[in-house]
Amino acid sequence: EAVVMAMRLHPHSALLNDKACRQLYIFMRDNGESAARAGKVGAVEDVVAAMLRHADCTSTMVQTHACFALDHLVKGNAQNTIRAGLAGAIEAVKTTIHRHASNEQVQQKARETLFALGKIDLKGFEADVPVGASEKDVALGV
């Protein structure tokens, strides 16, 4: 809750939003209960807002850590996936892919995040993820 509040109090600080997204990712790593709690306090919407607000930032760290955070917020959590869709997460991640096309780390993480959100982006061609598929079933970044 404190991390989400910090993002809200300092929305224009790329450094703070980067660190907040990274902290959210660490809190939620392999912990569905933490992801559910974070979603209930607005973490999904705040992460997407940070991605959109800092989309033009030359540093890719906000985008990278936001993708990590979104990935862990939505995996196995239908409510957070719905929240992400309503907040514009798919468009935010697509924007990240286009604006940071030369950064392979950002490309890989953004494509994994799209997959977690139910989309596949294969170098510009998009499709829905088959129900029940996992990352191992679909080659990302082909």
Image (tube, rainbow, N blue to C red):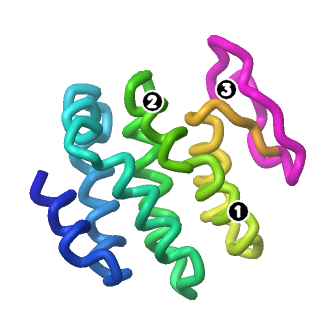
* Residue found at the very far bottom of the displayed protein: 58
Mark 2 element type: loop
Residue at 32% x, 50% y: name it: 25
* Relative horizontal placement of residue 79, taking residue 140 as reference (left or right): left
Image spot of residue 41 (x, y percent): 20, 43
Mark 1 element type: helix
Instruction: Check disc 2 and report the residue beneath it.
Output: 75
Q: Considering only order in the chain, which callout, 2 or 1, is on the residue closer to the N terminus?
A: 2
Per the model, the C-alpha gap separating discs 1 and 2 is: 20 Å
**Main secondary structure of the magenta stretch:** loop
Per the model, the C-alpha gap separating discs 3 and 1 is: 21 Å
Image spot of residue 98 (x, y percent): 75, 67
* Relative horizontal placement of residue 87, taking residue 126 as reference (left or right): left
Where residue 97 is drawn, which disc sits there?
1
Image spot of residue 5 (x, y percent): 16, 62
User: In the image, which residues are magenta?
Assistant: 122-142
Residue at 75% x, 37% y: name it: 120
Residue at 43% x, 22% y: name it: 78
Residue at 48% x, 47% y: name it: 87
Amino acid bearing label 3:
Lys
Amino acid bearing label 2:
Lys
Neighbours of disc 3 within 10 Å: few (<14), some (14-19), many (20+): few
Where residue 136 is drawn, which disc sits there?
3
For the residues carrying marks 3 and 1, which lies nearer the camera in this image?
A: 1
